[in-house]
Image: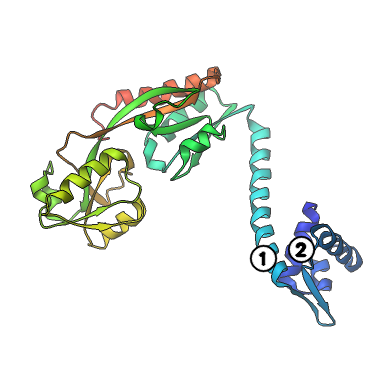
Amino acid sequence: MTTKQIDYCIELAHTLNFSRGADNMFVSQPTFSYQIRLLEEEVGFTIFERSGKGASLTPAGAQFVSFLTGMREDLKRAIEQGQNFSARYKDNISICMMVRQALYFLPEAMRIFAEAQPDVQITPVFQYENSMETFLQNEADIVFALKEQTRQVPGIQVHDLFESRIYLIAERDDPLAEKNLIREEDLYGRTLMVGGGSPLALKTVQHRLISSGKIDYFNSADHDTTLTNVAAGRGVCLAPGFLNDHSGQFAWIPFDCRESFSCVLCTHKEDRRDSLRSFLSILTKLYKDAVAFPL
């Protein structure tokens, strides 16, 4: 299967007309039809039904073209990224995290690093779940993680980054937003959003609050859904400080509890690149210097 055949197949699925499809691909109709036939012979099933009026997708063909379209877009992006990389960079460092705001100082670290090593690219990879698995499969060079996730994981090096506390998230006009510190009794009679893949420390606090019997709760699928529910006035939630995007949309008030999150960066032990060590040094220094920054 060639990229040309994929393009021809997708085009015919759009036009359902061999003549028009060939014109749009700037080839003769016999060439266009021949490539479609070769593709069908290779995959072993009929993609298009032919008739005097043109063509129509078979059920199998419709499913196949749907996958082809997604695959072609992925291939296009891969080619574009490869072209960009080959033109400017000699090396790449990929860093995986669940959301952009998890590493608030990442853009600044990338700017500083680019001034010193302009021929090395830093590529952020965002994966809300399974980022550690992606890293362990060598699909990322660095991963942002909680220290609890790194215990007894072989072949990695753990770099301490910062300690993140728990905050209450509420609408800015919520009476709770006027407080400097939220205590358990402040939440009595309120609805607390829970669930959504919460880390262990957060689940512990949520369970303790719900067990009081004085706080209602509502299960929410993930962090973005939770924030949507908070914005809709359905309740409040607790979250790690590292999820704060500092946009000012919500009030983030420190919650009075002993639990916190030890945030770290992990690298592969065998990765001894000087560029990797340099980038880690820049990023960790930014967090070390941000003593007064809420995390």
Tell me if residue 252 can be seen: no
Q: Is mark 2 on a helix, strand or loop?
A: helix
**Mark 1 against mark 2, which lies toward the viewer?**
1
Q: Looking at the picture, does residue 23 appear above or below residue 69?
A: below
Residue 79 lies, in percent from the top left, at 68, 44
Residue 5 lies, in percent from the top left, at 80, 57
Left or right, 122 with respect to 23, comes to: left
Q: Residue at horizontal 40%, vertical 33%?
A: 145
Closer to the N terminus: mark 1 or mark 2? 2
Q: Looking at the picture, does residue 150 appear above or below residue 227?
A: above
Q: Which residue in the structure is indicated by mark 1?
A: 63
Left or right, 198 with respect to 60, comes to: left
Q: Looking at the picture, does residue 291 appear above or below residue 250?
A: above
Q: Which residue in the structure is indicated by mark 2?
A: 9
Residue situated in front as seen by the camera: 18 or 154:
154
Q: Residue at horizontal 77%, vertical 52%?
A: 3
Q: Residue at horizontal 78%, vertical 71%?
A: 48
Left or right, 149 with respect to 70, comes to: left
Tell me if residue 231 can be seen: yes
Residue 49 lies, in percent from the top left, at 79, 75
Tell me the crowding category of disc 1: few under 14, some 14 to 19, or many 20 or more residues within 10 angstroms, Cα based.
Answer: few
